[in-house]
Amino acid sequence: MDHRPQAWGRPRDDVYGAYDHSYLQNSGPKQATQAPIVTGTSVIAMKYKDGVVMAADNLASYGSLARFPDVKRLRVFLDSSVVGFSGDVSDMQFLDRHLTDLSIDEAYEDPSCTAAPNGKGHLNAANLHKYLQKLLYKRRNDFDPLWNQLLIAGFDGHSKPYLASVDLRGTSFTSPSLATGFGSALAQPIMRRYAETEEDAAKLTREQAVEVIKECMKVLYYRDARSLDRYSIAVVTKDGVELKEDEQLEKQSWAFAERIKGYGTQTV
Amino acid sequence: MFRNNYDNDSVTFSPQGRIFQVEYAAEAVKQGSVVVGIASKTHAVLVAIKRNAEELSSYQKKLFPIDEHVGIAIAGLTSDARVLSNFMKQQSLGHRLTYGRNMPVRTLVDMIGSKAQINTQHYGKRPYGVGLLVAGVDDHGPHLFEFQPSGMTEEMVAFAIGARSQMARTYLEKNLEAFADCGREELIRHGLKALKESLVQDRELTIDNTSVAIVGVEKQEDGTTKPQPFMVYDGQDVSAWIESVADNQEAAPAAAEGEGMDVDS
């Protein structure tokens, strides 16, 4: 038996064979994130006349494995904005803690804001988006990116509904409807049918917007193999954020599946 | 000669519990010429008396813009004010860059407060020898803050610092109730009247020695407010205001009132 301190805590060589030290990189350059590991799939969001609706399913995948089926990916900021996270879940958790610190600092520096939760004076969604964009761009310049694409929903300085996106490179843009990941191929065309322009979005009612988002979540569950039928949905209004975190997809119909031919296990 | 053993540095208390270096710094503020600030529900104004070192020299500026929405008035060591002014400019620009909004005035004032307080707590450092009045607007409306070399900051309705400023403060206290509902022109006139109170005998306000600065909020059509940028007025630009508070005008305030309103529109 090897009693030297170097061998403490290691599998015994005489029982398990020589330990493969190539797994331990105790020298060499520091490696930043090269790829996301545990990931969340699409986040989708759409403006309507009095606010913004956002949704994301509750799944965190480990590659193609549906590893964590109860992970909430929408986060409320200062009771007035919502951030939706797709991409790496550990980076999402980092950002979540960072945003908690930010909101505490904000409340300390300007205590009058806490008296009016959705009032003026504290960081609004536009401010938050600008901040996150700078943060993600800084991390990409350090070659240590936060591997996420974020959607930020809320109101801007003129109390108009605000929706914007920022990705791991710091690229940011706004649009009446936005989707990340697979959603940009599957959900975005559906949302554009209802809100192609700001003017179109300003005509939509809350009920219509929620309906479109739910429809998109259903399409995503049908066609995105990294998705789940349990999801979170948030509606941001002037009065605050209504977040429901344990919704179930309703009225699914898989009849179309029979007509899909040409791949999979079927013998054509 | 009598020597005070407890004023060598800013980290030693006297047996009476005083820190002399900080008190001396507060004296430096009283050496500076007087500055007055007033805030209403819609505007904040700063007015100041400028001094020239000699007849042939120019007048030392007293009012400085920091950012679009904030400015300061200084009393005390100008070079120390420059350090604080540069710091405030950098901080508010940095805030604008990272958050895309005007820095809240209290946040900015708290930062110079912390910065100045640190100087009173380290051996080998000295307190700033300057007092500031900070005027600005943010989402909560117009604000006026006082800053002292000790690091103390306080929000004020109206205040005056600098030489003989007690006279100006007495005027402000007497008219305190009126300020909240004052318009821009009225507020400036109150400021200049307070300034006149603290002038030495047979000195008067001239276009050369008077500075005026204004910042405010404008109601937009959609109900939101928009800041009116911080503007400093000197020289010929302040002559109408000086005339409107001239002693011979006091007899006919109605005429002055009308004249002042024309400038506003």
Image (tube, coloured by chain):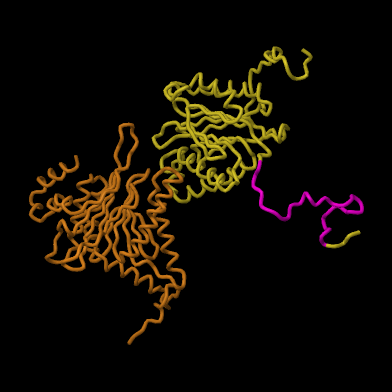
Chain colours: A yellow, B orange
Q: Nearer the viewer, residue A174 or B156?
A: A174
Residue B176 position within the rendered picture, expressed as x and y whole percent measured from the top left? 25, 53
Residue A100 position within the rendered picture, expressed as x and y whole percent measured from the top left? 55, 45
Magenta stretch contains residue A17:
yes
**Quadrant of the image for the N terminus of chain A?**
bottom right
Q: Residue furthest bottom?
A: B1
Residue at the (33%, 34%) spot, across then down: B223
Residue B231 position within the rendered picture, expressed as x and y whole percent measured from the top left? 26, 49
Residue B227 in view: yes
Q: Is residue B52 left or right of residue B124?
A: left
Q: Main secondary structure of the magenta part?
A: loop
Number of marks in picture: 0
Q: Is residue B200 left or right of residue B102?
A: left
Image: A62 above or below B175: above
Q: Nearer the viewer, residue A133 or B247?
A: A133
Image: A187 above or below B167: above
Image: B33 above or below B7: above
Residue at the (12%, 43%) spot, across then down: B258
Residue B211 position within the rendered picture, expressed as x and y whole percent measured from the top left? 22, 55
Residue B41 in view: no
**Quadrant of the image for the C terminus of chain A?**
top right
Q: Nearer the viewer, residue A223 or A109?
A: A223
Chain part drawn in magenta:
A5-34
Q: Quadrant of residue A217?
A: top right
Magenta stretch contains residue A105:
no
Residue at the (59%, 42%) spot, across then down: A146
Q: Is residue A68 left or right of residue B202?
A: right
